[in-house]
Each structure stands twice: as C-alpha cells, then as structure tokens.
Amino acid sequence: MNITQAVGRVIDESLCLNGRSATFTRNTPLLGAIPELDSMAVVALITALEEQFGLVVDDDDIDGATFATLGSLTDFVSRKLAVT
C-alpha cells in the first residue's frame, strides 16, 4: 500500500465513508467537497493521521490548503514522515 492509499484509508475510516475513498485520486478535493469533513472531523482526521503514521502535528503545521485534495494531504504526511 502506498502513502496515498494509506492516507485515503485513514480518511475513509475517520469520516465513516464506507469505502468511498477507494475511488479517490490525488486530485480529489477534500475540504469543502466532502460533507463529512467539517471542522470537528478535521481534528479527528489529524488525530487519526498522527496515530496511524506516528506523527506529531502542531497547529502551525496546517492550514486549509493542507486539506484541499488527497494529494495535498498526502504530501503533508510525506513531509512530516521525512522529518521524523
């Protein structure tokens, strides 16, 4: 499983998408496009990513652009993994 698939799986599980993320590509919009991804879900998703990948995400690390697409979120996770 590659990092994009792993991030997609975490999104699916965190947002209870029931497998919908299987069709996501790097260009799939997230924030503002998936109704389940509201402000509270963002917090839950960050926590799930931290647990799944062993990351620590500081408030200053993220902004809306991080959650723009599956690709932008995957790139964020990849960058965090590179520095840990």
Image (cartoon, rainbow, N blue to C red):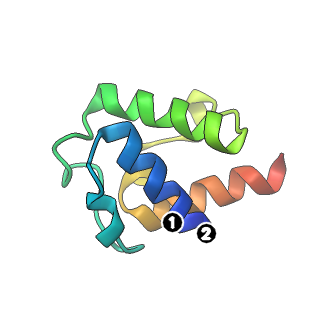
Coordinates of residue 59 in the picture (x, y in percent): 56, 28
Label 1: how many residues lie within 10 Å, few (<14), some (14-19) or many (20+)?
A: some
What amino acid does circle 1 point to?
Gln
Q: Is the Cβ of the residue at disc 1 closer than 8 Å to that at disc 2?
A: yes
Q: Which mark is residue 70?
A: none
Label 2: how many residues lie within 10 Å, few (<14), some (14-19) or many (20+)?
A: few
Residue 52 makes an appearance in the image: yes
Outermost residue on the front side: it is: 18
Which quarter of the rendered picture does the N terminus lie within? bottom right
Q: Which mark is residue 5?
A: 1
Looking at the image, which residue is at 70% across and 33% down?
56
Coordinates of residue 50 in the picture (x, y in percent): 63, 36
Look at the picture and state if 69 lies above or below 62: below
What amino acid does circle 2 point to?
Met
**Distance between the alpha carbons at the discs numbered 1 and 2:** 6 Å
Looking at the image, which residue is at 63% across and 34% down?
51
6 left or right of 71? right
Looking at the image, which residue is at 71% across and 50% down?
80
Which quarter of the picture shows residue 14? Answer: top left
Q: Describe the element under mark 1 as helix, strand or loop.
A: helix
Look at the picture and state if 40 lies above or below 84: above
Which quarter of the picture shows residue 37? Answer: top left
Which quarter of the rendered picture does the C terminus lie within? top right
Q: Nearer the viewer, residue 41 or 17?
A: 17
Coordinates of residue 22 in the picture (x, y in percent): 35, 67
Residue 64 makes an appearance in the image: no
Outermost residue on the right side: it is: 84
Q: Describe the element under mark 2 as helix, strand or loop.
A: loop
Coordinates of residue 60 in the picture (x, y in percent): 59, 33
Q: Which mark is residue 1?
A: 2
23 left or right of 35? right
66 left or right of 55? left
